[in-house]
Amino acid sequence: MNWTILIQVLGGLGIFIYGMKLLSESLQRVAGERLRSFLSSMTRNRVSSVISGSVITASIQSSSATTVLVVGFVNAGLMQLPQAVGVIMGANIGTTVTAWIVSLLGFKFNIMLFALPAISLGVLFHFSKKESRSGWGSFLIGFGLLFLGLDYLKSAVPDSAKDPESFFFLKEYIQPGFATVLFFVLVGTLLTILIQSSSASTAITITLAFAGYITIEAAYGMILGENIGTTITANLAAIPGNRNAKKAALAHTVFNVFGVLWVLLFFPSFTGLIDSLVPGDPLTNKDSTRYHISLFHTLFNVFNTLLLIGFVNTLSSFVSKIVDSVSKGKDGDSIRLLQSGSVKTTELAMVEVVEFTKKVIRDTYDSLRLTEQILVEAYDASKIMLVFKKENELDNVRSDIMSCLNEIQQSGVTGNYAKDVLGIMERIKAIEEMGDNFASIARKVRKANRQKIHLDKASQTVVHSQIEILKSHYDLLLSNLENAHSFDILANVSIRNQSKHYRFQMIQSVKKNESKVGKKKNQKKTNLLPSLLYRDISRNLDNISRHLNTSIYADV
């Protein structure tokens, strides 16, 4: 093979992949919040899940980005596994749009006529101070580079009739028979794993078949292999995730592998259907080759979805059994970014960090309930130790989230996302401080128990009322975050006024009862130790109230 041609092919492929990456990331940047809202609202049933997966993937031109987003949603507990399977099915259909774009535009028109103007216009928009306009500029640059790369790829692969020597080595592997199809299934799988882009692999397949270097059957085999290879991205992303994330990624693999197996089983019939639907014989009319491949890709994924859409729960149960049998230990609580390769974006990372932060807030509510039991019930050393354990876990979680936020900042954060990152940092700091105060109360109760000091009934009543204020404050925070996709809802004036009210109630309670402690100091024959214990505990509760208020006001 001519080394000059190889360099041109690799260069064209690199431009194509970078253009695809830039196009996908810019669309997520401009419309990421709307896409996430659409995805979460359109997964009520199997059909709507498939539709949402198709629409999002066709929009952002990356099935890998969609599947990784889905894995992240499942990992964060935002989406159930059957819903995720439906979206993954839809993503497989949506990704076939790329093949049609390449077939309809990449070989019929002079690509330079719209690729270069798109890049020029995109550069102008890219340097705009307005974030949305800058995002659309990146989209146009990505769009132009995608087709520029395709043009280089197409021109670097010469017509086999004019230059039969360039890719002559491929002829050695193309022999009549089913073995050739199986071989190119392997080639397509390895190629897609290597470049982590099924869209780029599809473009290469169409280009080679159009130039006459591989037969139509070999091209079909590569398309099937590419559908297996594309699942590697989600599986790599799910490695640090919990069991549910791994189940979603494995469901993607099982779904695609099953499709490849049944198509291979009925290969002559399936390819015969394609021939009957697309005019022209690919053996004699190379123009029809690209349409044969595109329709094969589309019908493969559509038929596979129609076959399995009624067995979503069965597929979910099947992958659950496999993952549960392999992962017998408990899921870790630490957070990891689930992105990998070309789909690592700020938008996807923020979904995971926001949801994990909400989960941490919910978990600290357990510490409040434990603290109440420690204060108003009989002494229980196991509950004291449990508070210490939760406080230690919270310290580790804070470190993990801060590391993730640091990664996000290093990737380049602008606009609302920069504000969100700072808000989450402040909330996590406040939550950790709350954990420290819960642990401080536990230590005081343990020390008092050793010294035979206990809260009197009056102090217990006051503490109970103060904890009820904290519960109401916590409920305000949690109930509003429950169905929200971000912390923006906490900017609501009524929510913040209610938070102020709970904070004021706590301040008044602490002041009122501390003044009573002060009066007791002047009374003779009074055991002050229970009162001093109450005072120290009430100050911890007051700190928790202050940090709860900070959690709501963090974005100000």
Image: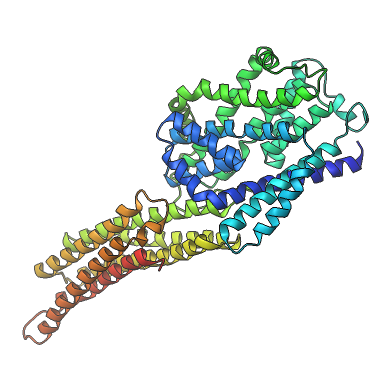
Q: Position of residue 546 (x, y in %)?
A: 30, 70
Can the viewer see residue 399?
no
* Residue 551 falls in image quadrant: bottom left
Side (left or right) of 178 relative to 233: right
Q: Which quadrant: the N terminus?
A: top right
Side (left or right) of 267 relative to 391: right
Point 91% across, 43% down: residue = 4
Q: Which quadrant: the C terminus?
A: bottom left
Point 6% across, 83% down: residue = 525
Q: Position of residue 144 (x, y in %)?
A: 72, 47
Q: Position of residue 209 (x, y in %)?
A: 79, 27
> Quick one: 360 or 227, which is closer to the camera?
227
Up the image or down, 32 lies above or below 307; here it is below
Up the image or down, 25 lies above or below 468; here it is above
Point 68% across, 32% down: residue = 99
Up the image or down, 176 lies above or below 92; here it is above
How many discs appear?
A: 0
Point 46% across, 42% down: residue = 38
Up the image or down, 275 lies above or below 475; here it is above
